[in-house]
Amino acid sequence: MEERVHHISIRKTKGFNLISRSEFLEIPSGERNRLILNKRVQFLDAAGLHIPLLEGIRSISLK
């Protein structure tokens, strides 16, 4: 299966942080869950286009 998520955008107080898939997975799971539940995360494909939340979560959860 092709890895669709290439970057994750995390909303901060002032702007966004753009991180890689591997950097996102290095964040402790509790912190990742909090970011997702607080709607501070957007998943992006290689072209920088938005991936729907559930699709992004599924994509990064599969190995």
Image (cartoon, rainbow, N blue to C red):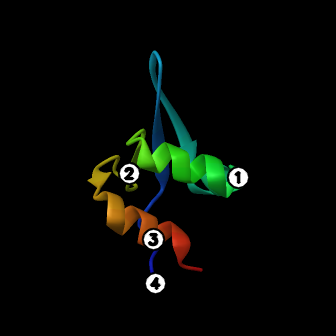
Q: Earlier in the sequence, mark 3 or mark 1?
A: 1
The residue sitting at 34% across, 65% down in the picture is: 54
What percent of the width, then of the height, locates residue 52? 28, 59
Gap in angstroms between the C-alphas marked 1 and 4: 25 Å
Which of discs 1 and 4 lies nearer the camera? The answer is: 1
Residue named by callout 1: 28
Residue type beneath disc 2: Leu
Q: Which circle's residue, 2 or 1, is located before the other in the chain?
A: 1
Left/right of residue 57 with respect to residue 63 in the rendered view: left
Q: Position of residue 19 (x, y in %)?
A: 56, 42
Query: Which kind of residue does numbered mark 3 sit on?
Result: Ser
Above or below, 45 relative to 59: above
Q: Specify the amino acid type for callout 1.
A: Pro
Q: Position of residue 10 (x, y in %)?
A: 48, 37
Discs 2, 4 touching: Cβ within 8 Å: no
Q: Which residue is mark 3?
A: 59
Residue at image position (53%, 78%) is 62
Residue 45: which quarter of the image? bottom left
Q: Which residue is mark 2?
A: 44
> Callout 2: few (<14), some (14-19), or many (20+) C-alpha neighbours within 10 Å?
many
